Image (spheres, rainbow, N blue to C red):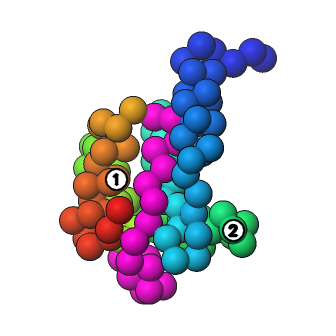
């Protein structure tokens, strides 16, 4: 099945972003993905090629919460910041993964900032 124009445009933007954005041990990359129903966020150390942590709207802490997609995305951002704090990660590089910075992507970023994560 061929990719839609919308998806191929996002992939092109994603590649352009990833050319200049990389995560290190000191400042890992916070990569976000959104599907029709859920949002996913993971913190990645690109130098060591390791995923340090991942949180999604399917996580046990958020699964029962429910609510509107925008509110759930903000909770995912707050939970990412909380887990990062437990792992002593204070700053990250935000990777919007080719998505426009509005809606659920912005809600994740705002939630993470509100909970104390810097980027």
Q: Residue furthest front?
A: 20
Query: Does residue 66 appear anywhere in the picture?
Result: no
Nearer to us in this view, 62 or 105: 105
Which residue sits at x=58%, y=76%? Answer: 25
Nearer to us in this view, 41 or 31: 31
Q: Quadrant of the N terminus?
A: top right
Residue 33 numbered tag: none
Mark 2 to mark 1 CA distance (whole Å):
24 Å
Q: Name above or below for residue 100 compared with residue 84.
A: above
Which residue sits at x=63%, y=21%? Answer: 8
Which residue sits at x=53%, y=68%? Answer: 28
Which region of the structure is painted magenta?
82-99
Q: Identify residue for label 1.
A: 108
Question: Quick check: 61 left or right of 2?
Answer: left
Which residue sits at x=26%, y=73%? Answer: 116
Residue 62 image point, x, y percent? 38, 63
Nearer to us in this view, 68 or 22: 22
Query: Does residue 88 appear anywhere in the picture?
Result: yes
Q: Identify residue for label 2.
A: 47
Q: Quadrant of the C terminus?
A: bottom left
Q: Name above or below for residue 115 compared with residue 32.
A: below
Crowding at dot 1, Cα within 10 Å, few <14 / some 14-19 / many 20+, comes out as: many
Q: Name above or below for residue 29 compared with residue 26.
A: above
Q: Is residue 84 magenta?
A: yes
Tag 2, which secondary structure? loop
- In this view, the mark in front (2 or 1): 2
């Amino acid at each position: 099945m061929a990719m839609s124009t919308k998806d191929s445009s996002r992939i092109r933007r994603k590649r352009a972003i990833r050319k200049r954005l990389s995560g290190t041990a000191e400042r890992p990359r916070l990569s976000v993905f959104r599907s029709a129903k859920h949002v996913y966020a993971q913190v990645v150390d690109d130098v060591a090629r390791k995923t340090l942590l991942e949180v999604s709207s399917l996580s046990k802490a958020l699964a029962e919460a429910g609510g509107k997609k925008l509110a759930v995305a903000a909770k995912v951002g707050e939970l990412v910041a909380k887990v990062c704090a437990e792992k002593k990660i204070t700053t990250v590089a935000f990777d919007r993964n080719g998505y426009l910075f509005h809606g659920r992507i912005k809600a994740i970023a705002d939630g993470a900032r509100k909970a104390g994560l810097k980027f």
